[in-house]
Amino acid sequence: MPEGASVPAIRCRGLGKQYRLGPRERYRTLRESLVDGFRAPWELVTRRRRGRRGELIWALRDIDLDITAGDVVGIIGRNGAGKTTLLKVLSRITEPTEGYAEVYGRIGSLLEVGTGFHPELSGRENIYLSGAVLGMRRAEIARKFDEIVDFASVAQFLDTPVKRYSSGMYVRLAFAVAAHLETEILLVDEVLAVGDAAFQLKCIGKMSEAASGGKTVLFVTHNMETVTKLCQRAVLMDDGRVTLTGTPEECVNHYLAGIRKTKLTEGTVMSLVRNAGRSEDHSGPVRLTGLALLNDDGVPSWDVRCGGRLSVVLSYDAAVGTSHNVMFAVTFSNIYNQRIATCRSNDASSEPVVVEGPGRARVTIPRVALRPGHYNLTVSVNTEAGYSDGIYDAAVFEVVGTDFYPTGTLPHPTQGSVLFDHTWKLNA
């Protein structure tokens, strides 16, 4: 290789992975297969062909990708874009249907938190077990043992079965084992979404340390801020294909533009009846059906004036015949999925909110104190029995700049996204 040329870590060419949808067929005995085969071979072939028609889906398709050794690469995209499947193929967890992927160097992956953990074993025992599953030698685990325990902050519970660990302790220990694996390539799949903020900072620091030590890191996440801060390159995926590779800023902006194009519909009232962001646990008696934003003039609009009045109107449908005591919530997040504020109906009033049948709930913010930019809305409703319905990132709206203070100036975006009304006095 010529002097100064980049050293490859991963090379994919024409990579594709196909899955079959539908329920898994039960295992058949040899006797059943022979009897069915002799009884009606032509019917068997016809039935199988007919049952398989329309059941195939490409999770990955035509992936051509080159990752240079030592790069920290963020992989972003919608749910179902193929990000995790790509990491599974690179980790040799699953084989590609077509094409190939070449990996140059020892690879370590943390795709599912707690891989190799046994609930009945202690934290100490699981460090050795999980390390062995991830490819670490016993001597290597013993050498790294104290660092792993210190990183995970579980020394006090080291001889306790992990089935008694909290979810946070479990995650910390699992990541600590994988992060201390001596590899040239590290694959990490959205594990930083679990755990507290302090632990997330430690994880990001560990990945930065791995990158500065010459390791190649592939990082799947929905946290756009982490991508722009941590990564040198980014890969944007959609529908199983790589749609863009470039700088983190380019890929993030392209991704967010696609979200805005999808969610800023022509209509002024958004239907929530069929929405991809709906939580899987939405079997409660109250269901959200529509969403609208009203501006200063009470007119539906997806553009809101900075410093202006904003109303969020939720349409709902509750089971008829029974009244329900509910709590509505509207959460505001920035484009990096960082939560800014949540407005809950039971915080604003001590009076219970009782619903029956279809209706609308409105929350009004007298003065929008957000700097200009795009923001996401997550909406939910809870009953006295618990969670009823919720839709993540239900809509994207834009705050349009005005003279908020009014001085004609606003703080730089790095100073924060919230604008406070305030006054200054000297010698007060």
Image (cartoon, rainbow, N blue to C red):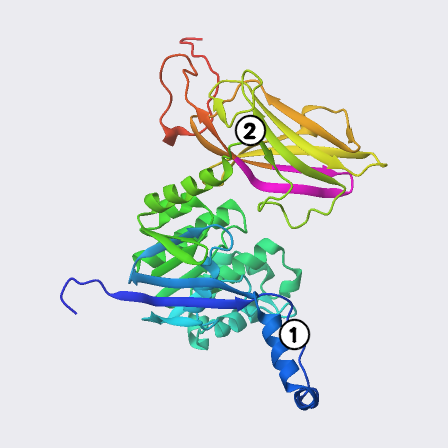
Q: Amino acid at mark 1?
A: Glu
Image side of residue 319 versus residue 29, left or right: right
Q: Which residue is mark 2?
A: 268
Residue occupying the point 71% across, 23% down: 349
Task: Give x and y (percent) for residue 112.
Answer: 53, 62
**Is residue 198 in view from this perspective?**
yes
Q: Can you name the residue that lies furthest to the left here? A: 3
**Placement of 381 over or under 49, stated as above or below:** above
Q: Is residue 390 magenta?
A: yes
Is the residue 265 above or below the residue 49 in the image?
above
Q: Which mark is residue 25?
A: 1
Residue at 42% from the left image edge and 9% from the top image edge: 425
Rendered-image quadrant of the N terminus: bottom left
Left or right, residue 175 beside residue 212: right
Image: magenta residue range: 379-395
The part of the image, by quadrant, that contains residue 288 is top right
Instruction: Please state the horizontal and vertical placement of residue 181, each as a whole percent of the image.
Output: 42, 67
Residue 222 tag number: none
Question: At numbered mark 2, what does the secondary structure look like: helix, strand or loop?
Answer: loop
Q: Residue at x 83, y 34 (%)?
A: 323
**Which image quarter holds the C terminus?**
top left
Cβ–Cβ under 8 Å for marks 1 and 2? no
The kind of residue tagged 2 is: Thr
Q: Main secondary structure of the magenta part?
A: strand
Q: Is residue 189 left or right of residue 285?
A: left
Compare marks 1 and 2 and give the one earlier in the sequence: 1
Residue 29 at x, y = what percent? 68, 86
Which x, y percent locates residue 277?
58, 45
Front residue of 396 and 130? 396
> Considering only vertical position in the picture, is 402 above or below 168?
above
Give the image quarter of residue 385: top right
